[in-house]
Image (spheres, rainbow, N blue to C red):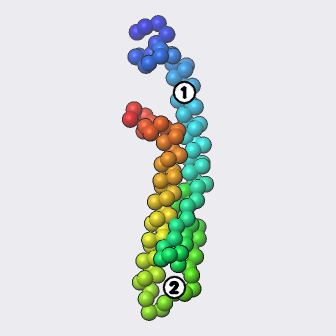
Amino acid sequence: MAKGGFGGFPGGGGMGQLMAQAQKMQRDMEKAQEEVRAMEAEATAGGGAVTVRVNGEHRLLSVAIEPGVVDPSDVEMLQDLVTVAVNEAMRKVDEAAAERMARVTGGRVPGLGF
């Protein structure tokens, strides 16, 4: 092993530098995870007849239903609209969370090298 290097890591920064980088990445990941938990996403279905909000912890925060869409003889349509809106809001928050985490990891999975 070359002097100052550590097992073939590029730059030869040494174990101390490697540990400092790992600790910084861990702090950055923890901060990003907090930001993801605080995220919110909103989605609508049926031209705005149903609006839902979810957070980064996949919790449904609110459901708003326009009174005109409530038809006792067609409950299935309302159920479908709620399902569509919730799924879209979850997709949005997942996409935003993935983008935020990718900024920390550079698109790589920590610990796996890709």
Q: CA distance from mark 1 to mark 2?
A: 54 Å
Q: Secondary structure at mark 1?
A: helix
**On the rendered structure, is 5 left or right of 21?**
left
The answer to which of marks 1 and 2 sits earlier in the sequence is: 1
Q: Is residue 1 above or below residue 54?
A: above
Q: Is residue 28 left or right of residue 86?
A: right
Identity of the amino acid at label 1?
Gln
Q: Badge 1: how crowded within 10 Å, few (<14), some, or many (20+)?
A: few
Q: Quadrant of the C terminus?
A: top left
Query: Which residue carries the number 1 mark?
Result: 21
Percent from the top left, x then y, of residue 92? Answer: 49, 59
Quadrant position of the N terminus in the picture: top left
- Residue plotted at (45% across, 79% down): 79
**Residue corresponding to mark 2:** 69
Label 2 CA crowd tier, 10 Å (few <14, some 14–19, many 20+): some
- Element under label 2? helix
* Along the line of sight, the residue nearer the viewer: 1 or 114: 114
Q: Please tell me which residue lies in front, 52 or 24.
A: 52
- Let me know if residue 50 appears in the view: no
Q: Residue 96 placed where, x, y %?
A: 51, 52
Q: Amino acid at mark 2?
A: Val
Q: Residue at x 60, y 49 (%)?
A: 35
Residue at coordinates 44% horizontally, 86% vertically from top-left?
75
Residue sitting at 54 percent across and 87 percent down? 68
Circles 1 and 2 in contact, beta carbons < 8 Å: no
Question: On the image, which quarter does residue 7 sit in?
Answer: top left
**From this viewpoint, which residue is outermost toward the top?**
3
Taking the view exactly as shown, the residue that stands out farthest to the front is: 47
